[in-house]
Image (spheres, rainbow, N blue to C red):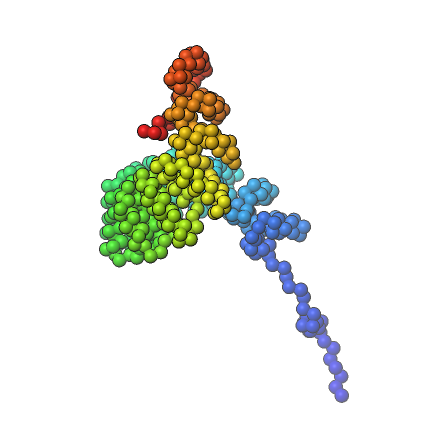
Amino acid sequence: MRPTTPLSSTKLAAFTSVLHPPPPRPPRFSLLADKCTSMYQLKQIHAQMIVSSRIHDNYAASRLLSFCALSESGDLSYAFRLFNNTKEPNSFMWNTLIRAQASSFNPSEALLLYVNMRRLDVVPGKHTFPFLLKACSNFQSLESCIQVHTHVLKFGLELDLHVVNGMVRAYSVSGDVRNARRVFDEVPVRSLSIWTTMISGYAQNYCSNEALELFDEMVVEGLEPNGATLASVLSACARSGCLDLGERVRVFMEEKGIEVGVILGTALVHMYAKNGAILMAQKLFDSMSERNIATWNAMICGLAVHGHAKEALDLFWKLEKEQIVPNDITFVGVLSSCCHAGLLDVGRRIFHLMKRVYGIEPKIEHYGCMVDLLGRGGELLEAEELIKGMAWKADVVILGALLGSCKNHGIIEIAERAVKEILVLEPHNHGVYVVLSNMYAEAGRWEDVLRLRKVMNTGNLKKTPGWSLVDSHN
């Protein structure tokens, strides 16, 4: 019998690993961060990174920061805490926070972040500037556009197509189509999105002839617009009243045999309805085999804006019968139509439907419609109580609507309370004193007229730009 040869240490280790395999390695923190669905999960991963001394792993930390800053379930303030506790934030982290701030309620913060980034000698890249330019677009600052443009030139990114698209949009939104066109012309090769942005920019700035010429030039150069491009141009036409370009787009679609699906169909209905071509909008709406709530909203709001209250309401009741769930935009359109037609009882009913039937919490636009409607109907106490019951603090627009109704109906007591509320928001508002003074004069209360005039003369008051009172019954 042959003697057995003892196993080497290497073979023994391999044999043991077969019998007792090692536990699987835990997944990387960056992979776990990418799979997060809530801040609770993210905080658990963050805690594990701290415990395991992996908190300075910038790649994993950047994934955590990305979720906090950009996800709907995230928390921007937590993202900043992560960022501020990172020893050397990488460019991805800076770009992520700039991107998040650009889409926030205060987009100018994105520019301040960029300033801090440059103070620390962090070099911006081609991804930084599109986010900065989006911020410029969102708060429509021409001065900021020009400053960002100089940095684009400084870092040699003036021919990057994403950056160019951002510059054209930012200049257009800020009302400077001349500079937008200059940037557009300096690019030797343009993408379809850049053409679309420039055409939409002209349309948004009421340059319909230039928009039409550029659209035709784009087609001549062999760039055929796709559905997203056409929808974008039609949306710009709707916002600016550029019916000629919108009609040209529709003709182009017919010539090329482009199918009018729900997105393009809705864009066309919206464009025609906003421009007052109600019959054309209705014809298109009726011909669509598939419609979503945006399609219904485009038609209802178009009818409401142009004084077709009965048709707007009929369409709303039809929507209900077809069991299509309305949203908050639907109710703005329907309540607006009730205001135009003075349908107080119908408006009350629809306003209560929002929350009781559809679970939609009324927003300030809905309250504004109801205050206007109640004011027109002389139900001023009810309008005042409605304002007091709002979840939001009343703004000058709603209080101004109440004051206007008080003037029309000669209700001084409520007018005085409305004026006090407006002056809390705008202490130097000259207009409300004039309205109240005129009401006192119409009621023969001359002592009150003299008292108000004395306040106006000594109170450093001024007429607030853009604030006026219109007789809602005319």
User: Can residue 426 be seen in this snapshot?
Assistant: no
Identified at 55% across, 44% down, the residue is 75
Is 119 rendered above or below residue 453? below
Quarter of the rendering containing residue 226: bottom left
Is 9 rendered above or below residue 299? below
User: Can residue 335 be seen in this snapshot?
Assistant: yes
Is 283 rendered above or below residue 393? below
Q: Is residue 46 left or right of residue 126?
A: right
Point out residue 5 in the picture as x, y percentages from the top left corner. Answer: 73, 80
Image quadrant in which the C terminus is located: top left
Q: Nearer the viewer, residue 258 or 377?
A: 377
Point out residue 96 in the picture as x, y percentages from the top left corner. Answer: 50, 45
Which residue appears farthest toward the bottom when viewing the image? 1
Identified at 58% across, 48% down, the residue is 39
Image quadrant in which the N terminus is located: bottom right
Which residue appears farthest toward the front when viewing the image? 345
Q: Count up the numbered dots.
A: 0
Point out residue 409 in the picture as x, y percentages from the top left corner. Answer: 39, 25
Quarter of the rendering containing residue 415: top left
Q: Nearer the viewer, residue 392 or 17?
A: 392
Is 44 rendered above or below residue 445? below
Q: Nearer the viewer, residue 280 or 445?
A: 445
Identified at 27% across, 53% down, the residue is 253
Q: Is residue 26 left or right of residue 446?
A: right
Identified at 31% across, 41% down, the residue is 308
Q: Nearer the viewer, residue 154 or 319?
A: 319
